[in-house]
Image: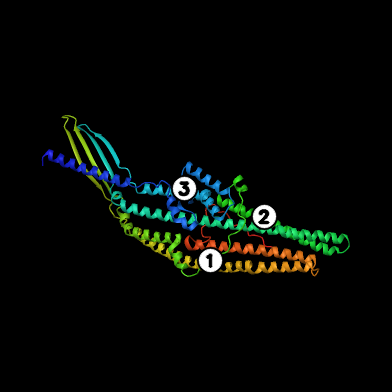
Amino acid sequence: MSRRAIRGTAHRSAVRTWCLLAAAAMLAGCASVSPDGLRGDVAAFTAHRTGSTPAAALPGTGPQAGAQAQKAVQALLAQPLTQDAAVRIALLNNPGLQARLAALGVADAERVQAITLPNPHLSLARLSNAHEREIERSLAFNLLGLLTLPWRADRQAERMQIATLQAAQETVALAADARRAWLRAVAAEQVADTHDRMVEAAEAGAELARRMVRVGNWSRLQHAREQAVLHEASAQRARARLAAATEREQLNQRMGLWGIQAQQYRLANQLPALPASPLPADGLEATALRERLDVQAARRQLDTEARQQGWSGAGAVFGDIGLAYQRNTAVERDTGHREITRGWELDLPVPLFDWGGAARTRAQMQVEHSAAQLQDTAVRARSEVRSTWLIYRTTLDLAHQQQSEVVPLRQFIADETTLRYNGMLASVWELLAEARSSTQAVATAINAQRDFWLAETDLQLALTGTSPGALTGPASGSAAAPTPQSH
Protein backbone atom coordinates (compact mmCIF):
# COMPACT_ATOMS: atom_id res chain seq x y z
CA MET A 1 0.00 0.00 0.00
CA SER A 2 1.34 3.43 -0.92
CA ARG A 3 2.20 6.13 1.62
CA ARG A 4 -0.69 8.29 0.33
CA ALA A 5 -3.18 5.45 0.83
CA ILE A 6 -1.88 4.87 4.33
CA ARG A 7 -2.26 8.55 5.14
CA GLY A 8 -5.82 8.60 3.75
CA THR A 9 -6.81 5.61 5.84
CA ALA A 10 -5.30 7.17 8.96
CA HIS A 11 -7.09 10.44 8.20
CA ARG A 12 -10.44 8.69 7.88
CA SER A 13 -9.81 6.84 11.14
CA ALA A 14 -9.03 10.12 12.89
CA VAL A 15 -12.23 11.66 11.53
CA ARG A 16 -14.29 8.74 12.78
CA THR A 17 -12.61 9.03 16.18
CA TRP A 18 -13.43 12.70 16.55
CA CYS A 19 -17.01 12.10 15.37
CA LEU A 20 -17.41 9.43 18.03
CA LEU A 21 -16.03 11.75 20.68
CA ALA A 22 -18.35 14.55 19.53
CA ALA A 23 -21.37 12.24 19.69
CA ALA A 24 -20.41 11.14 23.19
CA ALA A 25 -19.99 14.75 24.27
CA MET A 26 -23.42 15.64 22.89
CA LEU A 27 -25.03 12.66 24.63
CA ALA A 28 -23.38 13.52 27.93
CA GLY A 29 -24.35 17.16 27.54
CA CYS A 30 -28.05 16.28 27.42
CA ALA A 31 -28.01 15.77 31.20
CA SER A 32 -28.55 18.95 33.17
CA VAL A 33 -29.27 19.92 36.75
CA SER A 34 -32.88 20.71 37.58
CA PRO A 35 -33.22 24.53 37.79
CA ASP A 36 -35.37 24.33 40.94
CA GLY A 37 -33.47 21.52 42.63
CA LEU A 38 -36.37 19.07 42.00
CA ARG A 39 -38.64 21.07 44.31
CA GLY A 40 -41.33 21.06 41.65
CA ASP A 41 -41.26 17.25 41.59
CA VAL A 42 -41.56 17.13 45.38
CA ALA A 43 -44.45 19.60 45.28
CA ALA A 44 -46.23 17.47 42.65
CA PHE A 45 -45.91 14.38 44.86
CA THR A 46 -47.12 16.17 47.98
CA ALA A 47 -49.83 18.49 46.61
CA HIS A 48 -52.91 16.42 47.41
CA ARG A 49 -51.23 14.94 50.48
CA THR A 50 -50.71 18.27 52.27
CA GLY A 51 -53.58 20.34 50.93
CA SER A 52 -51.23 22.80 49.18
CA THR A 53 -51.05 23.47 45.47
CA PRO A 54 -47.77 22.74 43.66
CA ALA A 55 -47.35 26.43 42.74
CA ALA A 56 -47.49 27.60 46.34
CA ALA A 57 -46.52 24.61 48.44
CA LEU A 58 -42.72 24.94 48.39
CA PRO A 59 -40.48 27.97 47.88
CA GLY A 60 -38.04 28.19 45.02
CA THR A 61 -34.32 28.75 45.19
CA GLY A 62 -32.44 32.01 45.36
CA PRO A 63 -32.86 35.31 47.23
CA GLN A 64 -35.87 36.41 45.20
CA ALA A 65 -37.77 33.20 45.99
CA GLY A 66 -36.88 33.59 49.66
CA ALA A 67 -38.23 37.15 49.69
CA GLN A 68 -41.46 36.00 48.05
CA ALA A 69 -41.82 33.21 50.62
CA GLN A 70 -41.38 35.68 53.48
CA LYS A 71 -43.97 37.97 51.94
CA ALA A 72 -46.42 35.08 51.73
CA VAL A 73 -45.70 34.14 55.37
CA GLN A 74 -46.38 37.71 56.49
CA ALA A 75 -49.70 37.73 54.64
CA LEU A 76 -50.75 34.46 56.25
CA LEU A 77 -49.77 35.66 59.73
CA ALA A 78 -51.78 38.87 59.34
CA GLN A 79 -55.00 36.85 59.58
CA PRO A 80 -56.14 34.48 62.36
CA LEU A 81 -54.01 31.40 61.80
CA THR A 82 -55.99 28.49 60.38
CA GLN A 83 -54.85 24.91 60.07
CA ASP A 84 -54.14 25.16 56.34
CA ALA A 85 -52.26 28.44 56.84
CA ALA A 86 -50.04 26.78 59.46
CA VAL A 87 -49.19 24.02 56.98
CA ARG A 88 -48.44 26.55 54.25
CA ILE A 89 -46.12 28.51 56.52
CA ALA A 90 -44.32 25.34 57.62
CA LEU A 91 -43.71 24.31 54.01
CA LEU A 92 -42.52 27.79 53.09
CA ASN A 93 -40.47 28.65 56.14
CA ASN A 94 -39.29 25.55 58.03
CA PRO A 95 -35.46 25.62 57.90
CA GLY A 96 -35.15 21.86 58.35
CA LEU A 97 -37.27 21.29 55.26
CA GLN A 98 -35.25 23.84 53.32
CA ALA A 99 -32.08 21.96 54.26
CA ARG A 100 -33.62 18.69 53.09
CA LEU A 101 -34.68 20.20 49.76
CA ALA A 102 -31.23 21.73 49.30
CA ALA A 103 -29.72 18.28 49.92
CA LEU A 104 -32.00 16.93 47.18
CA GLY A 105 -30.61 19.58 44.84
CA VAL A 106 -27.09 18.48 45.77
CA ALA A 107 -28.01 14.89 44.96
CA ASP A 108 -29.36 16.01 41.58
CA ALA A 109 -26.07 17.74 40.80
CA GLU A 110 -24.22 14.59 41.80
CA ARG A 111 -26.48 12.61 39.46
CA VAL A 112 -25.50 14.81 36.54
CA GLN A 113 -21.86 14.50 37.55
CA ALA A 114 -22.15 10.70 37.68
CA ILE A 115 -23.53 10.41 34.13
CA THR A 116 -21.14 12.96 32.64
CA LEU A 117 -18.27 11.35 30.76
CA PRO A 118 -14.87 11.91 32.35
CA ASN A 119 -12.61 14.24 30.45
CA PRO A 120 -10.27 12.60 27.91
CA HIS A 121 -6.63 12.27 28.92
CA LEU A 122 -4.04 13.93 26.71
CA SER A 123 -0.47 12.74 27.23
CA LEU A 124 2.62 14.24 25.60
CA ALA A 125 6.15 12.83 25.65
CA ARG A 126 9.46 13.94 24.09
CA LEU A 127 12.15 11.27 23.85
CA SER A 128 15.61 11.63 22.28
CA ASN A 129 18.86 9.78 21.88
CA ALA A 130 22.06 10.27 19.89
CA HIS A 131 20.40 9.36 16.59
CA GLU A 132 16.80 10.58 16.73
CA ARG A 133 14.22 12.64 18.55
CA GLU A 134 10.71 11.25 19.14
CA ILE A 135 7.53 13.08 20.15
CA GLU A 136 4.57 11.00 21.38
CA ARG A 137 0.97 12.23 21.60
CA SER A 138 -1.92 10.19 23.00
CA LEU A 139 -5.61 10.99 23.54
CA ALA A 140 -7.49 8.42 25.66
CA PHE A 141 -10.99 8.12 27.07
CA ASN A 142 -13.09 5.56 28.91
CA LEU A 143 -14.78 3.42 26.26
CA LEU A 144 -17.03 1.50 28.65
CA GLY A 145 -18.24 4.75 30.19
CA LEU A 146 -19.38 5.82 26.72
CA LEU A 147 -21.08 2.53 25.90
CA THR A 148 -22.92 2.29 29.22
CA LEU A 149 -23.95 5.93 29.37
CA PRO A 150 -27.67 5.35 28.55
CA TRP A 151 -27.91 2.57 31.15
CA ARG A 152 -26.17 4.68 33.79
CA ALA A 153 -28.43 7.64 33.00
CA ASP A 154 -31.54 5.48 33.55
CA ARG A 155 -30.09 4.11 36.76
CA GLN A 156 -29.27 7.53 38.14
CA ALA A 157 -32.71 8.81 37.13
CA GLU A 158 -34.32 5.99 39.12
CA ARG A 159 -32.16 6.78 42.12
CA MET A 160 -33.17 10.42 41.97
CA GLN A 161 -36.81 9.40 41.74
CA ILE A 162 -36.38 7.39 44.94
CA ALA A 163 -34.61 10.31 46.61
CA THR A 164 -37.43 12.62 45.51
CA LEU A 165 -40.02 10.26 46.98
CA GLN A 166 -38.09 10.19 50.25
CA ALA A 167 -37.94 13.99 50.35
CA ALA A 168 -41.68 14.05 49.62
CA GLN A 169 -42.24 11.72 52.60
CA GLU A 170 -40.43 14.13 54.89
CA THR A 171 -42.42 17.03 53.46
CA VAL A 172 -45.72 15.25 54.09
CA ALA A 173 -44.56 14.32 57.59
CA LEU A 174 -43.75 17.96 58.32
CA ALA A 175 -47.19 19.01 57.08
CA ALA A 176 -48.79 16.43 59.39
CA ASP A 177 -46.64 17.66 62.28
CA ALA A 178 -47.76 21.23 61.60
CA ARG A 179 -51.42 20.16 61.58
CA ARG A 180 -51.01 18.30 64.86
CA ALA A 181 -49.21 21.25 66.44
CA TRP A 182 -51.97 23.63 65.32
CA LEU A 183 -54.69 21.34 66.69
CA ARG A 184 -52.93 21.03 70.04
CA ALA A 185 -52.26 24.76 70.27
CA VAL A 186 -55.85 25.78 69.50
CA ALA A 187 -57.30 23.15 71.83
CA ALA A 188 -54.91 24.20 74.60
CA GLU A 189 -56.03 27.83 74.23
CA GLN A 190 -59.68 26.80 74.43
CA VAL A 191 -59.07 24.60 77.47
CA ALA A 192 -57.16 27.43 79.18
CA ASP A 193 -60.17 29.71 78.62
CA THR A 194 -62.47 27.18 80.30
CA HIS A 195 -60.09 27.08 83.28
CA ASP A 196 -60.45 30.84 83.56
CA ARG A 197 -64.19 30.39 84.00
CA MET A 198 -63.65 27.64 86.57
CA VAL A 199 -61.35 29.90 88.56
CA GLU A 200 -63.97 32.66 88.45
CA ALA A 201 -66.57 30.28 89.93
CA ALA A 202 -64.12 29.11 92.59
CA GLU A 203 -63.21 32.70 93.48
CA ALA A 204 -66.88 33.57 93.88
CA GLY A 205 -67.36 30.59 96.22
CA ALA A 206 -64.28 31.44 98.27
CA GLU A 207 -65.35 35.08 98.63
CA LEU A 208 -68.85 34.10 99.68
CA ALA A 209 -67.44 31.63 102.19
CA ARG A 210 -65.17 34.32 103.65
CA ARG A 211 -68.12 36.65 104.16
CA MET A 212 -70.24 33.94 105.74
CA VAL A 213 -67.43 33.07 108.15
CA ARG A 214 -67.10 36.75 109.04
CA VAL A 215 -70.78 37.02 110.00
CA GLY A 216 -70.63 33.71 111.85
CA ASN A 217 -72.80 31.60 109.53
CA TRP A 218 -70.00 29.20 108.49
CA SER A 219 -67.21 27.40 110.23
CA ARG A 220 -63.56 27.82 109.39
CA LEU A 221 -63.53 24.21 108.09
CA GLN A 222 -66.12 25.01 105.45
CA HIS A 223 -64.17 28.13 104.52
CA ALA A 224 -60.98 26.08 104.21
CA ARG A 225 -62.69 23.66 101.84
CA GLU A 226 -63.69 26.46 99.50
CA GLN A 227 -60.19 27.90 99.70
CA ALA A 228 -58.78 24.49 98.74
CA VAL A 229 -61.13 24.39 95.73
CA LEU A 230 -59.89 27.83 94.67
CA HIS A 231 -56.22 26.86 95.01
CA GLU A 232 -56.75 23.67 92.99
CA ALA A 233 -58.59 25.57 90.25
CA SER A 234 -55.82 28.18 90.14
CA ALA A 235 -53.16 25.46 89.86
CA GLN A 236 -55.07 23.79 87.03
CA ARG A 237 -55.37 27.10 85.22
CA ALA A 238 -51.63 27.69 85.57
CA ARG A 239 -50.91 24.25 84.11
CA ALA A 240 -53.38 24.88 81.29
CA ARG A 241 -51.73 28.22 80.45
CA LEU A 242 -48.32 26.56 80.51
CA ALA A 243 -49.60 23.86 78.15
CA ALA A 244 -51.03 26.51 75.81
CA ALA A 245 -47.71 28.38 75.73
CA THR A 246 -45.77 25.16 75.17
CA GLU A 247 -48.03 24.02 72.35
CA ARG A 248 -47.73 27.42 70.71
CA GLU A 249 -43.95 27.12 70.82
CA GLN A 250 -44.17 23.67 69.23
CA LEU A 251 -46.23 25.22 66.46
CA ASN A 252 -43.71 28.06 66.10
CA GLN A 253 -40.91 25.55 65.73
CA ARG A 254 -42.63 23.66 62.94
CA MET A 255 -43.49 26.88 61.13
CA GLY A 256 -39.94 28.17 61.55
CA LEU A 257 -41.05 31.32 63.38
CA TRP A 258 -39.22 33.27 66.06
CA GLY A 259 -39.11 36.74 67.56
CA ILE A 260 -41.91 39.15 66.74
CA GLN A 261 -43.46 36.81 64.17
CA ALA A 262 -43.86 34.07 66.77
CA GLN A 263 -45.45 36.38 69.32
CA GLN A 264 -47.90 38.53 67.41
CA TYR A 265 -49.99 36.19 65.30
CA ARG A 266 -53.42 35.11 66.49
CA LEU A 267 -54.70 31.55 66.46
CA ALA A 268 -58.12 30.66 65.15
CA ASN A 269 -60.79 30.67 67.85
CA GLN A 270 -61.85 27.05 67.68
CA LEU A 271 -61.19 23.64 66.20
CA PRO A 272 -62.91 22.48 63.00
CA ALA A 273 -66.37 21.03 63.40
CA LEU A 274 -66.72 17.27 63.61
CA PRO A 275 -67.81 15.45 60.44
CA ALA A 276 -71.31 14.05 60.40
CA SER A 277 -70.16 10.56 59.39
CA PRO A 278 -66.82 8.74 59.40
CA LEU A 279 -64.78 7.63 56.42
CA PRO A 280 -65.75 4.11 55.36
CA ALA A 281 -63.26 1.34 56.04
CA ASP A 282 -63.72 -0.30 52.62
CA GLY A 283 -60.75 -0.01 50.32
CA LEU A 284 -58.43 1.70 52.77
CA GLU A 285 -55.68 -0.91 52.47
CA ALA A 286 -55.77 -0.79 48.67
CA THR A 287 -55.59 3.01 48.79
CA ALA A 288 -52.55 2.85 51.06
CA LEU A 289 -50.71 0.38 48.82
CA ARG A 290 -51.47 2.54 45.79
CA GLU A 291 -50.88 6.02 47.23
CA ARG A 292 -48.32 5.80 50.02
CA LEU A 293 -45.00 7.37 49.16
CA ASP A 294 -42.91 4.90 51.16
CA VAL A 295 -44.51 1.98 49.28
CA GLN A 296 -43.76 3.69 45.96
CA ALA A 297 -40.17 4.32 47.01
CA ALA A 298 -39.67 0.69 48.07
CA ARG A 299 -41.18 -0.55 44.79
CA ARG A 300 -38.88 1.68 42.74
CA GLN A 301 -35.89 0.58 44.78
CA LEU A 302 -36.66 -3.06 43.95
CA ASP A 303 -37.04 -2.27 40.24
CA THR A 304 -33.72 -0.40 40.20
CA GLU A 305 -31.83 -3.19 41.93
CA ALA A 306 -33.38 -5.81 39.64
CA ARG A 307 -32.30 -3.94 36.49
CA GLN A 308 -28.84 -3.35 37.90
CA GLN A 309 -28.30 -7.01 38.74
CA GLY A 310 -27.52 -8.10 35.17
CA TRP A 311 -24.71 -5.55 34.77
CA SER A 312 -23.02 -6.02 38.12
CA GLY A 313 -20.78 -8.96 37.20
CA ALA A 314 -19.71 -7.57 33.84
CA GLY A 315 -19.12 -4.15 35.32
CA ALA A 316 -16.86 -5.55 38.01
CA VAL A 317 -14.74 -7.41 35.41
CA PHE A 318 -14.71 -4.98 32.48
CA GLY A 319 -15.21 -1.69 34.26
CA ASP A 320 -11.93 -0.14 33.07
CA ILE A 321 -11.94 -0.56 29.29
CA GLY A 322 -10.04 2.31 27.73
CA LEU A 323 -9.52 3.46 24.12
CA ALA A 324 -6.68 5.74 23.04
CA TYR A 325 -5.55 7.34 19.78
CA GLN A 326 -1.81 7.88 19.31
CA ARG A 327 0.21 10.00 16.92
CA ASN A 328 3.98 9.71 17.27
CA THR A 329 6.68 11.63 15.36
CA ALA A 330 10.31 10.45 15.08
CA VAL A 331 13.03 12.68 13.53
CA GLU A 332 16.54 11.39 12.67
CA ARG A 333 19.22 13.81 13.78
CA ASP A 334 21.64 13.11 10.90
CA THR A 335 19.32 13.19 7.90
CA GLY A 336 16.37 15.11 9.29
CA HIS A 337 14.04 12.38 8.04
CA ARG A 338 10.62 12.61 9.79
CA GLU A 339 8.56 9.47 10.42
CA ILE A 340 4.96 9.76 11.66
CA THR A 341 3.10 6.80 13.06
CA ARG A 342 -0.59 6.73 14.01
CA GLY A 343 -2.70 4.11 15.62
CA TRP A 344 -5.18 2.95 18.25
CA GLU A 345 -4.65 1.49 21.66
CA LEU A 346 -7.25 -0.61 23.50
CA ASP A 347 -6.83 -1.12 27.24
CA LEU A 348 -8.59 -4.28 28.53
CA PRO A 349 -8.47 -5.72 32.04
CA VAL A 350 -7.48 -9.38 32.29
CA PRO A 351 -9.83 -11.26 34.67
CA LEU A 352 -7.25 -13.45 36.39
CA PHE A 353 -8.37 -12.94 39.97
CA ASP A 354 -11.78 -11.26 39.96
CA TRP A 355 -14.39 -12.86 37.71
CA GLY A 356 -17.24 -10.79 39.14
CA GLY A 357 -18.67 -13.51 41.37
CA ALA A 358 -18.73 -11.37 44.49
CA ALA A 359 -20.35 -8.49 42.59
CA ARG A 360 -23.05 -10.79 41.21
CA THR A 361 -23.74 -12.20 44.68
CA ARG A 362 -23.90 -8.72 46.13
CA ALA A 363 -26.37 -7.63 43.45
CA GLN A 364 -28.53 -10.72 44.08
CA MET A 365 -28.58 -10.05 47.82
CA GLN A 366 -29.49 -6.43 47.20
CA VAL A 367 -32.47 -7.53 45.10
CA GLU A 368 -33.60 -9.93 47.83
CA HIS A 369 -33.11 -7.19 50.43
CA SER A 370 -35.19 -4.73 48.42
CA ALA A 371 -37.92 -7.32 47.86
CA ALA A 372 -38.09 -8.01 51.59
CA GLN A 373 -38.15 -4.28 52.32
CA LEU A 374 -41.06 -3.80 49.92
CA GLN A 375 -43.00 -6.64 51.51
CA ASP A 376 -42.30 -5.29 55.00
CA THR A 377 -43.38 -1.79 53.97
CA ALA A 378 -46.61 -3.13 52.45
CA VAL A 379 -47.44 -5.21 55.53
CA ARG A 380 -46.74 -2.25 57.80
CA ALA A 381 -48.87 0.03 55.63
CA ARG A 382 -51.84 -2.35 55.82
CA SER A 383 -51.53 -2.69 59.59
CA GLU A 384 -51.13 1.03 60.19
CA VAL A 385 -54.18 1.88 58.10
CA ARG A 386 -56.30 -0.61 60.02
CA SER A 387 -55.11 0.56 63.44
CA THR A 388 -55.31 4.29 62.64
CA TRP A 389 -58.82 3.85 61.26
CA LEU A 390 -59.91 2.12 64.48
CA ILE A 391 -58.50 5.02 66.50
CA TYR A 392 -60.14 7.48 64.11
CA ARG A 393 -63.52 5.76 64.40
CA THR A 394 -63.40 5.49 68.20
CA THR A 395 -62.30 9.07 68.78
CA LEU A 396 -65.06 10.32 66.47
CA ASP A 397 -67.67 8.40 68.48
CA LEU A 398 -66.27 9.74 71.75
CA ALA A 399 -66.17 13.30 70.45
CA HIS A 400 -69.76 13.07 69.20
CA GLN A 401 -70.81 11.63 72.56
CA GLN A 402 -69.20 14.51 74.43
CA GLN A 403 -70.70 17.18 72.18
CA SER A 404 -74.16 15.75 71.61
CA GLU A 405 -74.82 14.01 74.94
CA VAL A 406 -72.47 14.89 77.80
CA VAL A 407 -72.25 18.67 77.29
CA PRO A 408 -76.04 19.09 76.74
CA LEU A 409 -76.68 16.90 79.77
CA ARG A 410 -74.37 19.01 81.94
CA GLN A 411 -76.03 22.16 80.59
CA PHE A 412 -79.45 20.75 81.46
CA ILE A 413 -78.28 19.97 84.99
CA ALA A 414 -76.87 23.49 85.33
CA ASP A 415 -80.12 25.05 84.13
CA GLU A 416 -82.20 22.94 86.50
CA THR A 417 -79.89 23.80 89.37
CA THR A 418 -80.30 27.48 88.55
CA LEU A 419 -84.09 27.09 88.61
CA ARG A 420 -83.92 25.30 91.97
CA TYR A 421 -81.64 28.03 93.29
CA ASN A 422 -84.10 30.70 92.15
CA GLY A 423 -86.86 28.77 93.93
CA MET A 424 -84.67 28.55 97.05
CA LEU A 425 -84.51 24.74 96.69
CA ALA A 426 -80.72 24.64 96.03
CA SER A 427 -77.88 26.45 97.70
CA VAL A 428 -75.45 28.80 96.06
CA TRP A 429 -72.71 26.21 96.68
CA GLU A 430 -74.55 23.66 94.54
CA LEU A 431 -74.93 26.28 91.84
CA LEU A 432 -71.20 27.10 91.86
CA ALA A 433 -70.20 23.43 91.95
CA GLU A 434 -72.43 22.71 88.98
CA ALA A 435 -70.95 25.66 87.08
CA ARG A 436 -67.47 24.18 87.59
CA SER A 437 -68.67 20.73 86.48
CA SER A 438 -70.28 22.14 83.33
CA THR A 439 -67.14 24.03 82.43
CA GLN A 440 -65.06 20.89 82.96
CA ALA A 441 -67.39 19.00 80.62
CA VAL A 442 -66.75 21.63 77.96
CA ALA A 443 -62.98 21.22 78.41
CA THR A 444 -63.30 17.44 78.11
CA ALA A 445 -65.33 17.85 74.90
CA ILE A 446 -62.65 20.13 73.45
CA ASN A 447 -59.97 17.55 74.18
CA ALA A 448 -62.11 14.81 72.60
CA GLN A 449 -62.57 16.96 69.51
CA ARG A 450 -58.80 17.57 69.38
CA ASP A 451 -58.07 13.84 69.73
CA PHE A 452 -60.35 13.06 66.79
CA TRP A 453 -58.63 15.53 64.48
CA LEU A 454 -55.23 14.22 65.56
CA ALA A 455 -56.41 10.71 64.69
CA GLU A 456 -57.76 11.98 61.36
CA THR A 457 -54.36 13.49 60.56
CA ASP A 458 -52.65 10.19 61.34
CA LEU A 459 -55.14 8.32 59.16
CA GLN A 460 -54.55 10.60 56.17
CA LEU A 461 -50.80 10.26 56.63
CA ALA A 462 -51.07 6.46 56.81
CA LEU A 463 -53.24 6.43 53.68
CA THR A 464 -51.20 8.62 51.34
CA GLY A 465 -47.86 9.52 52.92
CA THR A 466 -45.87 7.32 55.25
CA SER A 467 -45.99 5.76 58.68
CA PRO A 468 -47.45 8.12 61.33
CA GLY A 469 -44.55 8.93 63.61
CA ALA A 470 -42.04 6.90 61.56
CA LEU A 471 -40.55 10.06 60.08
CA THR A 472 -39.95 12.96 62.38
CA GLY A 473 -40.51 15.95 60.16
CA PRO A 474 -37.59 18.32 59.62
CA ALA A 475 -36.95 20.35 62.73
CA SER A 476 -40.02 18.89 64.34
CA GLY A 477 -38.48 18.65 67.76
CA SER A 478 -39.62 16.52 70.64
CA ALA A 479 -43.14 15.40 71.31
CA ALA A 480 -45.48 18.05 72.58
CA ALA A 481 -46.39 18.12 76.23
CA PRO A 482 -49.82 16.66 76.96
CA THR A 483 -52.64 18.96 77.93
CA PRO A 484 -53.16 18.70 81.69
CA GLN A 485 -56.42 17.13 82.70
CA SER A 486 -58.63 18.62 85.36
CA HIS A 487 -60.27 16.64 88.08
Whichever of callouts 3 and 1 sits on the residue coming sooner in the sequence is: 3
Q: Amino acid at mark 1?
A: Thr
In three-dimensional space, the C-alpha distance between marks 1 and 2, rounded to whole angstroms, equals 29 Å
The image quarter containing residue 411 is bottom right
Q: Position of residue 272 (x, y in %)?
A: 58, 60
Foreground of the two, 283 or 6 = 283
Quarter of the picture containing the N terminus is: top left
Left or right for 478, reference 119: right
The image quarter containing residue 159 is bottom left
Judge depth for marks 2 and 3 and give the one in front: 2
Whichever of callouts 2 and 3 sits on the residue coming sooner in the sequence is: 3
In three-dimensional space, the C-alpha distance between marks 3 and 1, rounded to whole angstroms, equals 33 Å
| Residue at the (19%, 43%) spot, across then down | 13
Q: Is residue 4 above or below residue 98?
A: above
Q: What numbered label is drawn on residue 102?
A: 3
Label 2 residue SS: helix
Label 3 residue SS: helix
Q: What numbered label is drawn on residue 388?
A: 1
On the image, numbered disc 2 is attached to which residue?
242
Is label 2 in contact with label 3 (beta carbons under 8 Å)? Answer: no
Crowd class of label 3 (few under 14; some 14 to 19; many from 20; radius 10 Å): some
Q: Position of residue 211 (x, y in %)?
A: 85, 59
Label 1 residue SS: helix
Q: Is residue 487 visible?
A: no
Foreground of the two, 431 or 280 = 431
